[in-house]
Amino acid sequence: MRRRTLLVHQGITQVEFDPATGKELTKQKRLWSGTGGMFPEAPHLYRIGDYWYLMIAEGGTERGHSVSIARGPRPDGPFTGAPHNPLVTARGTDRPVQNSGHGDLVQLGDGSWGMVLLGTRPRSMTRAFAPIGRETFFTPVTWVDGWPHVEPVRLAERRPAEDLAITFPSEAPSSLH
């Protein structure tokens, strides 16, 4: 008789390895499991100022998708989650951009900060159909008390369509003959 085992998600784990051989040099260490959302994944580790920031996606890639962050004194922690997690999510909202997650912090040339992240623009009554699929968006980030605060993703206002007329010559240029 085959025994069923439950998969237990370990959250974000870390291990040192030899890049030449692929051999593990340390035992696997649990770093952070996020805020309790499903599927904590896609860790990004940043050194900003005096802290190491561990940013993850969680909640799956659908309606619960989000970005959460923790910080610690070293790249191996210990990590403490931001008091205002998740940093960004659209769950429970009617925002035009949904399923926002899988973010990356970026510092712009002028010193300001932003986040590049994935999201969808669903259409239809089920809010599950997104004809373009997952898209890349950008949203501003501010820092308060050593924590990033992310603006919800907003779409730019639509501009009216412009007429465009292109006239092609009736003959191909002689260099193409």
Image (spheres, rainbow, N blue to C red):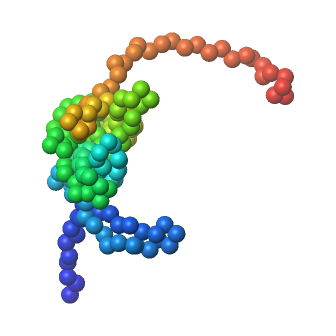
- How many numbered marks are there? 0
Image coordinates of residue 2 in percent, x first then y, are 22, 84
**Quarter occupied by residue 41:** bottom left
Which is nearer the eye, 63 or 49?
A: 49
Q: Which is more toward the observer, 1 or 33?
A: 33
Name the image quarter holding the N terminus. bottom left
| Residue 107 % position (x, y) | 39, 35
Q: Residue 92's spot in the image, x, y percent?
A: 16, 38
Q: Residue at x 16, y 40 (%)?
A: 84
Which of 105 and 1 lies nearest the eye of the viewer? 105
Q: Residue at x 28, y 47 (%)?
A: 51
Q: Residue at x 26, y 37 (%)?
A: 148
Residue 33 percent location from the top left of the image: 21, 57
Q: Quadrant of the C terminus?
A: top right
Q: Is residue 126 visible?
A: no
Q: Name the foreground residue: 24 vs 1.
A: 24
Q: Residue furthest bottom?
A: 1
> Is 66 on the left or on the right of 177, as rendered?
left
**In the displayed structure image, the side of residue 29 where residue 174 appears, left or right:** right
171 up-or-down from 60: above or below: above
Q: Please tell me whether residue 176 is drawn above or below residue 65 in the rendered image.
A: above
Q: Is residue 36 visible?
A: yes
